[in-house]
Image (cartoon, grey):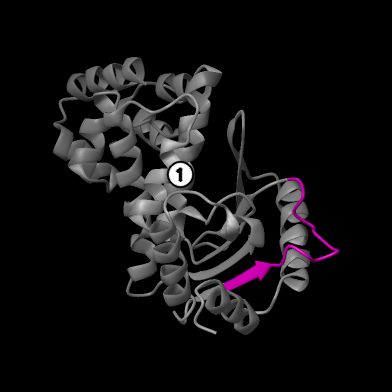
Amino acid sequence: MKMLGRQLGTARRAAGLSQPALAAALNMDDETIASIEQGRRPLKLDIAERCDELLGTKGTLAAGVTNLPEIDQFPLWAEEYMGQEKVAVALSWYDALVVPGLLQTEAYARVVLQNRVPAYAEEDLETTLRLRLDRQEILKRKCPPTLSFVVWEPALLLKIGTGEIRREQMRYLREVAELPCVSLQVLPLDSPLHAGVAGPFTLLETPDHQQIAYTESQRGSQWVSDPEEVSRLARKYAMLRTQALNHQDSKGLLDRLLGER
């Protein structure tokens, strides 16, 4: 990433452009260009291709992005996902291990991140926590996306953090469940059917109505754009919604977990 950033900076200067001028030509923020050139933000393939055209680098930057070592591919996919998440028109999220990241309180998210092995350095933990919480801004968008969540009940019963942290998280889930843009369903522990045994995943619809998906596992994250693979996950999600409690009954379950009924 640092090498590609230096190459971009060198090509930009050779073309006689400032960072603001290149940012304007690409319809991007000045800070984004600066971050890419400093190696703090990955250069995405579509931006690399546009830069090659603008700066006359004849495909050099795009080739560099395409041939990044695998160790850099996982953060690149995550960066691409978060960029798409910000502008998505619909998002469907299945989680079986913890409360979905978009619905986590700060205290709960901190405990989840503190359970990582190997452990985060303190500075990295704070950065990751802030990034996770910043993503929740999509819930407050003027025109928020349609958000559907299916959560396996054990994720709500996990004794993670203090009792107050867990209660605060359940209260927040109950509040979010009342938002008109949100559907929250719980797949009960005693359900004899479970289409999500292979693990958590997210489906996303872009503004141009492209269907894409994102999965995470012990080995890292994966960006899924192949139509057949996305279709398979979409069918799993549709089945999970039929197996889970409906939205109203799921709110009732949260009320019982909170001891309010």
Residue highlighted by disc 1? 112
Residue 1, located in which quarter of the rendered image? top left
Foreground of the two, 5 or 47:
5
* Residue 163 is inside the magenta segment: no
| In-image side of 131 versus 81 (left or right) | left
Question: Which range is magenta?
Answer: 184-198
Relative height, residue 234 to residue 55 (above, below) = below
Q: Residue 174: give x, y in percent of width and height.
A: 47, 75
Q: Residue 191: give x, y in percent of width and height.
A: 80, 66
Name the residue at 75% across, 55% down.
Answer: 231
Q: How many marks?
A: 1
User: Disc 1 residue type?
Assistant: Val
Relative height, residue 248 to residue 153 (above, below) = below
| Circle 1 crowding by C-alpha within 10 Å: few under 14, some 14–19, many from 20 | some
Residue 188, located in which quarter of the rendered image? bottom right
Q: Residue 46: give x, y in percent of width and height.
A: 45, 38
